[in-house]
Amino acid sequence: MVFETGGMSIGFAGTDYDTFFANVSQQKITYEEFGNKNVRDYKENNTSFANVLTDIRNLFGLVTADRASSAAHPSLVLTEYELTTLRGAYERTMLHGNAGKAIMTQAEYVLYGSYDPLTVTVTHILNNKLGIGWTSYAHTGVPVPVFAKGAGADLFAGNYHQEQIFNKLTALTGVK
């Protein structure tokens, strides 16, 4: 069965339910790459919060109020609350390093799931500024219909686990 990814919703109270989808073009790196490469490097090199903010500006378009004139859109300026939240996530990430998951409090787990606090916080802030919300750190239990037309369409009748769909597509296309 293919399940919905993250329970995405369009609209966020913080933007009065307006959306700013064009601002996603300011994101130059994936969530995974930021967490796996950049955040790992920050921990190894004890990177300052100021330098991390520079990366966040360059990679996600989020800017501090003192740099508001450089923002691609006014909605990408960090509020004082967002900046404080981001600093807390940075400190949590830097303080606990890779052992952080083992000593995470319940409140932190609710905020970050099992993921790196800095990475989650940056992407939550950006998503909120775009007017997008998520109900999950993973897949929801809502099945997603998959339709097929043309050669091999008969292979897709019924319900399948998402990996089976991948395997069927690779078999049909000859991709290895």
Image (spheres, rainbow, N blue to C red):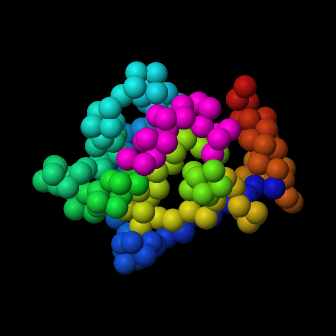
Task: Look at the image and say whether residue 59 sits in the magenta stretch.
Answer: no
Q: Is residue 95 magenta?
A: yes
**Is residue 83 placed above or below 119 in the rendered structure?**
below
Q: Quadrant of the C terminus?
A: top right
Residue 174 locus on image (x, y percent): 73, 30
Q: x, y percentage for residue 82?
A: 36, 58
Q: Position of residue 146 (x, y in %)?
A: 73, 59
Residue 141 drawn above or below residue 17: above
Residue 141 location, x and y as percent?
Answer: 76, 63
Residue pictured at 78% horizontal, 43% vertical:
163
State the residue in front, 143 or 9.
Answer: 9
Q: What residue appears at the point 40 percent right and 21 percent down from the top-left corner?
A: 45
The main secondary structure of the magenta stretch is helix
**Which residue occupies the extreme left position in the image?**
69
Query: From the image, which quarter does the N terminus lie in?
Result: bottom right
**What is the span of residues highlighted in magenta in the rendered image?**
87-104
In the rendered structure, the answer to whether residue 131 lies left or right of residue 141 reads left
Query: In percent of the image, x 72 and y 52: which residue is there?
Result: 150
- Where is residue 164, by image quadrant? top right
Task: Give the farthest residue toward the right.
Answer: 158
